[in-house]
C-alpha cells in the first residue's frame, strides 16, 4: 500500500470510529429511556408524567444531543461512502440502514408525539390529563424500544466494521530473508 492509501485508510478508520461512538451514545440514550426513565415515569401520576416528559423534550433539544443524533447519521453515511469496495462495506451499510431506520422512527413517530404532548398545554390546566397521557405513553414507549434496538444493531454493525477495518500487516514471513527469496 502507498503512503497516500494508508493515510486515506487511517482517515476512514477515524470517521468509522467517530460514527461508532456517536451511534453508541444515541443507542445508550434510547436504552436508558427504555430501561429506566419511562419505567420510572410510569409510576407517576398523569400530570407529573406529562410535565416531566415535556421538560425532557425541551431540554434534550440542545447542541450536544443534536451533535450525536445528527452526527451519527452523517458520520455513518460518510463511513459507508468511504468503505465502498472494501470487505467491511456491508457492515457499514447495515449499520447505516439500521441507524437511518432509528432516525426515521424518531422523526416520524416520537417527535410528533412529543409535539402533541407540548400542544396539550400546561399540565396543571389540562382538563383530562389521563387521556393526554393515554394518547402518548404506550405508543412512545413501544417505538422508543424499536429505535433502541435499531440503534443498538447499528452500533454492533459499526463495531464489527471497525474490527475488520484493521490496517493490513505485512507478513512476517515475507518480510524475512526466507520470504524475500521466496518472492523472487
Image (tube, rainbow, N blue to C red):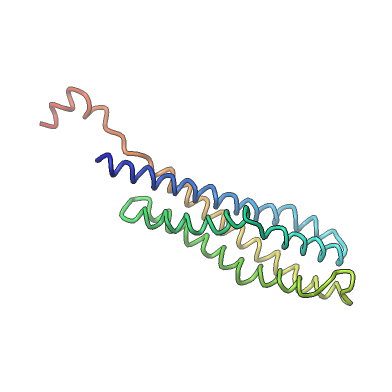
Looking at this view, name the residue that lies furthest to the left: 184
Residue in view at x 85 percent, y 72 percent: 130
Q: Is residue 119 left or right of residue 147?
A: right
Q: Position of residue 25 (x, y in %)?
A: 60, 50
Question: In which quadrant is the N terminus drawn?
Answer: top left
* Quadrant in the rendering for residue 59: bottom right
In this view, 130 is above or below 77: below
Residue in view at x 70 percent, y 67 percent: 140
Q: Position of residue 125 (x, y in %)?
A: 89, 73
Q: Position of residue 95 (x, y in %)?
A: 48, 56
What is the total number of numbered labels drawn onto the structure image? 0
Question: In which quadrant is the C terminus drawn?
Answer: top left
Residue in view at x 37 percent, y 42 percent: 10
Q: Position of residue 127 (x, y in %)?
A: 89, 77
* Quadrant in the rendering for residue 124: bottom right
Residue in view at x 86 percent, y 62 percent: 48
Q: Is residue 43 left or right of residue 78?
A: right
Looking at this view, name the residue that lies furthest to the front: 63
Q: Is residue 106 left or right of residue 36?
A: left
Amino acid at each position: 500500500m502507498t503512503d497516500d492509501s494508508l493515510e486515506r485508510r487511517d482517515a476512514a478508520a477515524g470517521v468509522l470510529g467517530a460514527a461508532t461512538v456517536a451511534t453508541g451514545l444515541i443507542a445508550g440514550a434510547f436504552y436508558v429511556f427504555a430501561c429506566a426513565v419511562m419505567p420510572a415515569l410510569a409510576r407517576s401520576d398523569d400530570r407529573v408524567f406529562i410535565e416531566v416528559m415535556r421538560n425532557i423534550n425541551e431540554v434534550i433539544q440542545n447542541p450536544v444531543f443534536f451533535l450525536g443524533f445528527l452526527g451519527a447519521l452523517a458520520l455513518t453515511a460518510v463511513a459507508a461512502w468511504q468503505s465502498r469496495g472494501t470487505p467491511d462495506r456491508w457492515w457499514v451499510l447495515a449499520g447505516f440502514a439500521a441507524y437511518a431506520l432509528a432516525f426515521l422512527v424518531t422523526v416520524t413517530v416520537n417527535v410528533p408525539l412529543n409535539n402533541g404532548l407540548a400542544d396539550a398545554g400546561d399540565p396543571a390546566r389540562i382538563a383530562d390529563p389521563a387521556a393526554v397521557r393515554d394518547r402518548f405513553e404506550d405508543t412512545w414507549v413501544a417505538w422508543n424500544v424499536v429505535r433502541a434496538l435499531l440503534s443498538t444493531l447499528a452500533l454492533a454493525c459499526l463495531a464489527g466494521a471497525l474490527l475488520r477495518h484493521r490496517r493490513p500487516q505485512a507478513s512476517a514471513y515475507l518480510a524475512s530473508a526466507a520470504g524475500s527469496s521466496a518472492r523472487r
